[in-house]
Amino acid sequence: MPNPPNQLGGDSPSIFPLVSKKREIVLFSSTAIALYGYDQGMMSLINTNYSYLKTMGIAEESPIVGIIVSVYYLGCAAGAVVASWLADREGRKPSIFTCLATTALGNILMFVSGLSGLSAEASSSWNGHAIITMLLGRIVMGLGVGGIDAVIPVYSSELSSDKARGRALAQEFQMNIFGLLVAYAINLGITIAWGKENQWAWRVPIIVMQAFPILLMLVISRLPETPRWFFSKNRKDDAKDALEDIHGKETAASKFAELEKAQEEESNAKVGYKDMLIPGGSHSHPSMVTVMGQINQALTGYGAVSVYGPQIFELLGFNTRPAEYLTLGNYISYFLTMTIAWLTIDVIGRRRLMIWGSAGLSASFLLLTIFGGLATVSRIPDLAVEIPGTVILFIATTIFGITWLPTVWLIPTEIYPSTARAQGAAISVIVWGFANFTVTLLTPIGFNQLKYWLFLVFAVTNGFAGWWTKRYSPESGGRSFEDNQGFFESAAKEGSWVVSKVDGGRFKRMERKAVEQPEEEEGIRSPLLGRREN
């Protein structure tokens, strides 16, 4: 088992003298989540590189372009299952380490596919096997990144306070957008410098990604395993050491008692995928909330916007290079405005943000449909369409980042007991993988067949996402993991999944307590980022 967590004692120092252990955990988790965003930004311009298309032996408008992008998500789905099993069996940290190594291997396979030395021309010596190597690399990297996306939210949430889980995960997903931004900026800069005929214009952005998993594998041994996992394996001494490593001895004692009580309540509640996925199973209800959360996020259309950003701007009438610059600007805005997400998610709540987000995105895509249509009318000045269309697309991206990006990843980590949390996160990634596989596969076809009417499709699907969330998705923020089980228990007793009818509608919004404990207040302001050194 790599980097055994039980080697960490209560006096383990931080990697950096001025950085607390809590901050290290956030930085590590955030950097790991950035891998997901980096791939999206990386592929958005690789798809239009002429050397890449020639090396793979495909045409620019071939559906195979979408297949190469989308098989990655199938790998993610499979990786989530394997990683969640390993996370429960060996620990969160060993699972993450294995996923990082797998990601690095897949990245190397992508880099070498069709490699032809220092020449800018594709080598014929691969005899058509370049595309097979690329597809294999995409799948293998998907296995690693999918596993990371399944385990990191669990790892982070199990180390966060009840009042700060949302902010911690939102900060991590801001780094996801940072990864997307960095990948796209590198890709765009190299493409401008070397041109779309140069093979290194698409290979260099791929290999740069190696810095993420290598760095993370080097530092993971310094981080603690989650105390909840230790309790699930009856390793109470290790759980105590981990709590002291994170919180200090004084706070660790009270948290140890809380976790011990929670574990006693869950000790006889072993849960498997059968209980979670078969209708009528003991945990089928939270699984349906998880499944529909990811499906609805895919229906917002922003998987397509992230991967095919330049093509989206071209539908508004922009030429290729201005569309690429505007995509970069949109990603910069996306990253900066994600700050609002971690300032609001533990105040407004997950459910309300998603409902408001769907309404805003529906309106935005409806307006984009109108402007996309106007872009085809020759009598209308180009700027009359391009300027307002760009503003709306920037606003829509901001809305998605604040409302839908972190929430659906957070909810599965909050609504399952410890014995099912890793499997719940895996289900989330599996559905995300298949949903985004479908969206990224069909989007190029939508561009070619529907043109700007594709925006109208997304306007309708966002309306459905908002309706379903309002009716069936409970508010899980601000409550303990154990408290959130109360919603599903009440729903079973009352025979209804409609949030407004369960327990008098108590789970329609976050609970507000008159008096907060000092530690909880600190957690709200600064989850895992406290200034106090541990």
Image: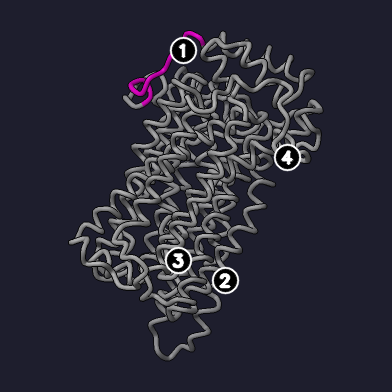
Nearest the eye: 146 or 523: 146
| N-terminal label among 2 and 4 | 4
Label 4 crowd bin: few (<14), some (14–19), many (20+), radius 10 Å: few
Q: Position of residue 529 (x, y in %)?
A: 73, 38
Distance between the alpha carbons at the discs numbered 4 and 1 = 40 Å
**Residue lying farthest to the bottom in this orientation:** 379
Distance between the alpha carbons at the discs numbered 2 and 1 = 51 Å
Taking the image as shown, residue 342 lies to the left or right of residue 300, namely right
The label number, if any, that marks residue 269 in the structure image: 1
The label number, if any, that marks residue 16 in the structure image: 4
Look at the numbered disc 2 and give the secondary structure of its residue: helix
Taking the image as shown, residue 504 lies to the left or right of residue 23, namely left
The label number, if any, that marks residue 391 in the structure image: 2
Q: Are marks 2 and 1 in contact (CB under 8 Å)?
A: no
The label number, if any, that marks residue 309 in the structure image: 3
Locate the C terminus by quadrant: top right
Look at the numbered disc 3 and give the secondary structure of its residue: helix
Q: Position of residue 66 (x, y in %)?
A: 30, 59
Distance between the alpha carbons at the discs numbered 1 and 3 = 45 Å
**Number of numbered markers:** 4
| N-terminal label among 2 and 3 | 3
Q: Residue at x 43, y 78 (%)?
A: 320
* Amino acid under disc 3: Gly
Q: Residue at x 47, y 24 (%)?
A: 1
Relative to 308, residue 8 above or below: above
Give the magenta-colored segment's residue range.
Answer: 267-276
Look at the numbered disc 1 and give the secondary structure of its residue: loop
Residue 98: within the magenta?
Answer: no
Nearest the eye: 507 or 73: 73
Q: Nearer the viewer, mark 1 or mark 3?
A: 3
Q: Position of residue 250 (x, y in %)?
A: 79, 18
